[in-house]
Image: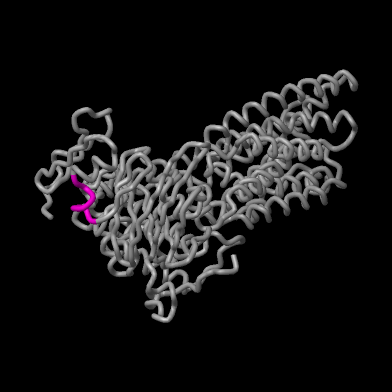
Amino acid sequence: MTDEPEPQLHPAPEPAAAEPEAAAPVLSLDGVGVSLSGRQILQDVTFEFDAGEFIGLIGSNGAGKTTLLRVILGLIHPTTGTILVAGRPRSRRNPMIGYVPQKIGLDPDMPIRARDLVGLGLDGQRFGLPLPSATRRAEVDAMLEAVDATRFADQRVGNLSGGEQQRIMIAHALISRPRLLLLDEPLANLDIRSEQEVVELVARIATEQQVAVLISAHDMNPLLPVMDQVVYIAGGRVASGTTEEVVSTESLTRLYGHRVDVIHVNGRILVVAGRENEGLHHHHGPDDHPGRSR
Amino acid sequence: MRMPVAATLAHVVFEPGFFSSSPVRVALVVGAVAAAVSGVVGVFTVARGQSFAGHALSDIGTAGGSAAFLIGISPLYGFVVMNLMAAGVMELIGIRRPRGRDVATGIVLGAALGLAALFLYWDTTSTSTTGATVNVLFGSIFTLPASMVPVIVILSVLALGLTLALYRPLILSSLSPDLAAARGVPVRLVGVGFLVALALAVSLSAITIGAILSTALLIGPAATALRLTSRTGTALVAAAAIGIASTWLGILLAYDSYDWTASHRAWPVSFFVVALVFVGYLVVDLVVGRRASAPRRTGATATTGATGATATTGATRASGAA
C-alpha cells in the first residue's frame, strides 16, 4: 500500500525514453503454462504487444481465456514461463493494469452510485473512510465524461443497463491511468447496439490514452473493425498475430488439432468444425448483424 | 422534530419515572449502540447477500447465551464467544464461495442449535423457570446490569471501527473478489474482518432484543435504508438512525404498556422494536417503490409527462448534462 500512484488529472505523460520499460512491450508472455489441481489449463502461451494496441483474446467458453487474464493479473501463478508487464516481472496490485472482470456483483441492493464506483478505481484498496476532495471529484467527473456516463453518474449502479454498467466498470479500470486494460467478456449479455458502443468506446479510449487493450470474447465479429491483433485460444494453447494470419483454416486447424473451417460471409468470420470433427467450435454471427468489410 | 413534540406531550407520552428509572437508562444506551452497530453492519450484510449468515449467527448465538446463563455469567459473553467461533468455522469450511457459503452456514447452524436445545433444557431444569429461555431467545434489555454498559460500548466501538476501516476494500470485494484481489486487497482477510464485525453486531443485537430476533435489527433498518438512498455513506447513517429510533420508541412503548391493561403486565420490548422496524420497512417500501418505478419508465420512453415530479426532474437533469 506504499506504492500508491499519484492521482493525476490529466493523462500520464509519455514515459521518458531513458526508462528501460518505455521501449519494452506493454505485455509479453513467454512459454507460459498453467496447471490447476493437476490439470493443464494453459501451455506454451507466447505473445507480446505494445501501447495503444487493441488485442482480441478469442476462444470458446472454457478455452482458458479467464485463466489467462487471471495469470496476467497475478491472481494465478504460472507453472512455467515468464510474464513481463512493461518490461518488469508483474506483481500483484500492479497499477499498470486496469481490469474489468466478467462477473460483477452489481446487485440492485448495493448502495453505490456510478460515480462512487468510478472513484473506487482511484483508492478502493485503501482502508478507512474516503475523504471528500475537489481533485478527486474533478478526476471522477472527467472520467465519467470520457466514457459518456455523466448522464447516469448519480444513479445506483445496480439499476443501470448492462451497457451502462460496462461503461462504469471501464471508467473504474481506467481512472488510475493503467498502460494495459484487461476486459473479460465485456460483450457477453449485451444487445447488439450496446455491444457496438462498448467496442467503439474502448477503441477510442485505447487510442486517446495510449493504453493497450486485451479484450476477451467468444465471438470475434464485433471486434473485427478495431482489432490490431488476435490471440486465439483453444484447448489451452494460443495462436497470435493479425486476424489474417491467425484466423485461417490452416492456422486454426493446427491450433485445434482437428479440421476447422474458417468461412468469410459479408465481412464476418465464422469458425466451424470441419468434417471428422468432435463437436468442437461452432460460431454463428447473428443474422441481423450489420455487415462489415475489412 | 421529535423534541418539541416530546416536550408538549411529555406527560402523556412518557409514563412517570421513565427517565429516572435506571433500567430504562441502561436500556436506552445499550439499545442505541446495539442498533447503530447493527444498522451499519447490516447494510453491508444485505448488500453482500449474507443475510442468511447473519441470521444463522444470531441463532447460533443461542447456544452461547444459554451456556453463559448456565455457568452464571452474562449471556453477552456467551453470544460473543459463540458467534466468533461460529464465524471462524464458517470461514474455514468455505463461506467465501457463494455455493459453499450456504452449506457451511447450514452445517454450523444445525450443530449449534442442537447444543442450544441441550443448554436451554439444562437452564430450565436447573432453575425450574422459563426465564433463561425467554431472556436468551427474546432479549433482556430491562434486566441488564449497569455494569455491563462499558463492555457493550467497547464491543460496539470495535465492531463499528472494524466495519468503517474495511469500508472501501469491503465494497470492492463485494463487487468482485477478483477485481479487489487484482488491486491488492487481501480479500480473504477483509471477509474475515467483516465476519468478526457481523458476529459482534449480532451479539449486541441479541442482548438487546434476543438471539432469535436480532436478525430483525440487523436486516430491517439496513434494508429500509437501502430503499431510501443510493449513497453508501448515507445508507449507513440512515440504517443506524432507523435502528436507534425503532429501539428507543420500542423501549418507550414497552415501558408505557405497563398501564395499558388492568393486569399491569408490560409487553416485551423486543415485540415493539421488531414491529416498528417491520412497519418502517413496509411504509418506505410502499412510498419509494411507487416513486422508483417512474424514472425507469422515463429511461425507456422519454418523458411521458404524467409520471410526476421525479420523472421530470430526472429527464431535465439528463438533457442538461448532455
**Rendering coords of residue A181 (x, y %):** 38, 59
Q: Is residue A244 magenta?
A: yes
**Which quarter of the rendering shows the N terminus of chain B?**
bottom right
Picture quadrant where residue B76 is located: top right
**Which quarter of the rendering shows the C terminus of chain B?**
bottom left
**Rendering coords of residue A26 (x, y %):** 38, 65
Question: What is the number of callouts on the image?
Answer: 0
Task: Give the vertical position of A111 relative to A90 (above or below).
Answer: above
Picture quadrant where residue A210 is located: bottom left
Q: Is residue A8 left or right of residue B268?
A: left
Which is more toward the observer, B208 or A279?
Answer: A279
Q: Is residue A42 left or right of residue B63?
A: left
**Rendering coords of residue B276 (x, y %):** 60, 38
Q: Residue at x 72, y 41 (%)?
A: B251
Q: Is residue B165 left or right of residue B305?
A: right
Residue B255 at least partly seen: no
Which is more toward the observer, B9 or A25?
Answer: A25
Q: Residue at x 44, y 62 (%)?
A: A84
Q: Which residues are magenta?
A: A242-248
Colouring convention used in this rendered image of the protein = one colour
Q: Residue at x 46, y 61 (%)?
A: A121
Which is more toward the observer, B105 or A20?
Answer: A20
